[in-house]
Image (cartoon, grey):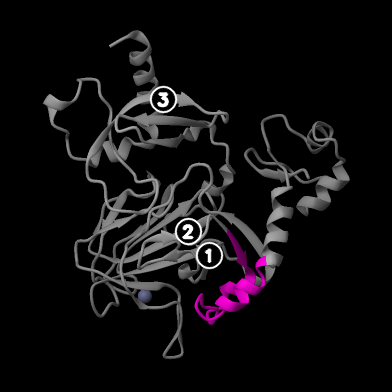
Amino acid sequence: MNIRKLTSLIIATLFLSNAFAQSTETDATPKADSLPEDAIVIHRVPLESGPEIETDVLVVDTIPSSSEGLAIVLYNDNTWRYIRNRSISALDETVFTKNWNNEVLNPYNINANDLPASMIIDLVDSLKSYHYPYKGRVTSKFGYRRRRAHQGTDIGLQIGDPIYATFDGRVRVVQHSNKGYGNLIILRHDNGLETYYAHLSEVLVEPNQWVTAGQVIGKGGNTGRSTGPHLHFEMRYNGLSFDSERLIDFATGTLRRETFLLKRTYFNASSRFTQDFDVEVQSDEEDKKIAAEAAARKYHTVRKGDTLGKIAINNGTTVKKLCQLNGIKESSILSLGQKIRVR
Ligand SMILES: [Zn+2]
């Protein structure tokens, strides 16, 4: 092995030790005769939904990308994946600190009426991270069921089937219970969404652990208030649930869209994907306009020593304009990692 290869493997080790600490521990040990001693073996996460890939692959190189928080990792089967360096994350870092609580299921305490009329959610950014939580037939939809609001989507399964993390993120809650949700995992993702996985027979993750899309986080089951083995899956934003079928086609496992215009009206329990599909198509033009406006926005992540004045000068704007854009006062105290809209 030449020096360059060796160096890149060391870099890959350093880079991956954080993100994959858990997955390397839980993955089966590879056959020793087929791999070099210093090989880093990680369980491959498919880039798109598709047939499960059970083979372990070898990291052969790590290449820096244009963003310092990201690197590209090459595998020995000619596939590649973006890997996020959590210590220099390019995204809003407050996602994993603000309203972070390992006990309370909904720590946000936010009313839907206080949110904007629509919000842009980046589901699969350049990281290309998505995996279906479980692929199968929907047995009960989001919405009213015998006059009671069903906050999630039920998918029938066999006890013990693997349940996957939908996007990259971090485990916020692990709750062991034989009531209600049964054994429950709540993940929070970089895009700000939370996903709930309920009635599990086994939980394979711990609170505060980082997870990668496609990582097996638990096994399907029938715990809690459940009348048969199924996954109760919820998608929430700011603690408010909406129909996950808007995003995921559970029958095929595919993600319906890469950017999602989450409308405030979706938080209404009677707002179901299939019900207003035609309306959605009609308002597509309007959505595109809003998305284009959102794309023109520019944000600055607050670093040590930043002041509103400094941020204004560096971005050719004024303190007054910054306050208007962010709904803050000139006297507001900035916190590290806070995202400030500058345009
Ligand atoms: Zn359910």
Rendering coords of residue 159 (x, y %):
19, 66
Q: Position of residue 145 (x, y in %)?
A: 42, 86
Q: CA distance from mark 1 to mark 3?
A: 37 Å
What residue sits right under mark 2 in the picture? Answer: 194
Kindly tell me whether residue 116 is visible in this rendering. Answer: no
Disc 2 to disc 1: CB gap under 8 Å:
yes
**Viewer-closest of 286 and 141:** 286
Tell me the quadrant of ligand 1: bottom left
Give the mark nearer the N terminus: 3 vs 2.
3
Look at the image and give the residue range highlighted in magenta. 260-284
- The image's mark for residue 62 is 3
Q: CA distance from mark 2 to mark 1?
A: 8 Å
Location of mark 1 (residue): 239
Q: Amino acid at mark 2?
A: Glu
Tell me if label 3 and label 2 are in contact, CB under 8 Å. Answer: no
Total residue callouts: 3
Q: Nearer the viewer, residue 134 or 228?
A: 134
Residue at x 52%, y 53% (from the top left corner)? 123
Q: Residue furthest bottom?
A: 146
Q: In this rendering, which labeled residue sits more in front, label 1 or label 3?
A: 3
Graded by Cα atoms within 10 Å as few (under 14), some (14 to 19) or many (20 or more), the crowding at tag 1 reads some
